[in-house]
Image (tube, grey):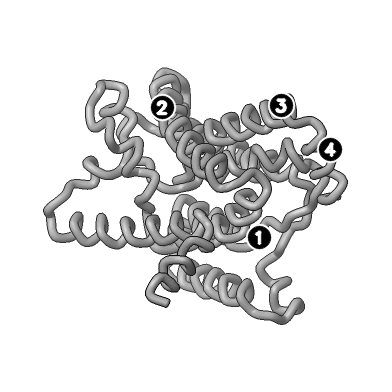
Amino acid sequence: MSQFPFSLFKHIGATFWLICANVFFFFLFSFLIRLGILDIGMIEAQPRALLGGEHLWTIITSMFMHQSFFHLFVNMFTLFFLGAFCERIIGKRRFLSLYFISGVVAVAFFAIGAGIGSSLPRGDWIFGGLDTYAAGASGALFGLLGVMAVLIPRHKIYLVAGPLLVFIAQVLVDELYPVPFVQFLLNILLLGMLVSMFTFNARWQRYALPLALPLAWAPVVAIVPLVIISFFFPLPIGNTAHFGGLVVGLLYGFILRLYYPNKIALLRKFFK
């Protein structure tokens, strides 16, 4: 009977523990930074430092830090659904390996991209600046999205487009028409969309603008529009990091297809 709690925890997936780790380290790092014990450059990844061989540990720590609570919420909300689904498809060990490798490669892409972009017109808008700090689990999440897009490309998922569109609108308002009252209205709209996502009423959930599309198209929809906008306005989004994580996921998906063709064929029949 004394072993019951431990046997219970064995059935909890890796996705749950990753969410717990992300939440725990977000609040821990934020607390230590606020107290002045740690500097943000010791936690988040800065391309200039990484390319100079400094603060290399931030390749890992930046994966467990987020720019804001909203940033953390959106990524953990995505990880809760996408991660749990991916973990059941490819297994816990492959899932964890893919998550961390995608996250590391994403940071590397961001640093290299910033180095290349520093010599191009508006390169810092598209690739990120050398002194820009990067943080978040987005790169790892795009790795999960990539492998699923290869394994079951026709299976439909929902991308919640509403909060992202409001976030982009907030950035544009700051650049073009910085009026506090407009930002306040956008914050109210954003909060309403987030609340509607957790209701059990399909009518209310529509206000969050869920977009149903095949997994094969999900990476394109999630990356290309943001890259296009970055040509005209600087967005606080790591396009190159997302692309780096996606590349890892796509490559791993094709490797699994090569080594397990029969299993993948059965998987595709099940997830049409």
> Which residue is rendered at x = 45% and y = 54% of the image?
18
For disc 4, the marked residue is 265
The amino acid marked with disc number 1 is Val
Discs 1, 2 touching: Cβ within 8 Å: no
1 in relation to 267, above or below: below
The amino acid marked with disc number 2 is Ala
Q: Earlier in the sequence, mark 1 or mark 2?
A: 2
Kindly report which numbered mark, 3 or 1, lies closer to the viewer in this rendering. Answer: 3
The alpha-carbon separation of the residues under discs 3 and 2 comes to 35 Å
> Which residue is rendered at x = 44% and y = 73% of the image?
4
How would you rate the neighbour count of disc 1 (Cα within 10 Å): few for under 14, some for 14-19, many for 20 or more?
Answer: many
Q: Earlier in the sequence, mark 4 or mark 2?
A: 2
Q: Earlier in the sequence, mark 1 or mark 4?
A: 1
272 vs 230, nearest the viewer: 272
Kindly report which numbered mark, 1 or 2, lies closer to the viewer in this rendering. Answer: 1
Q: Earlier in the sequence, mark 3 or mark 1?
A: 1
The alpha-carbon separation of the residues under discs 3 and 1 comes to 33 Å
For disc 1, the marked residue is 160
Name the spot of residue 6 as percent of width and height, x first: 42, 66
The amino acid marked with disc number 3 is Tyr
The amino acid marked with disc number 4 is Ala
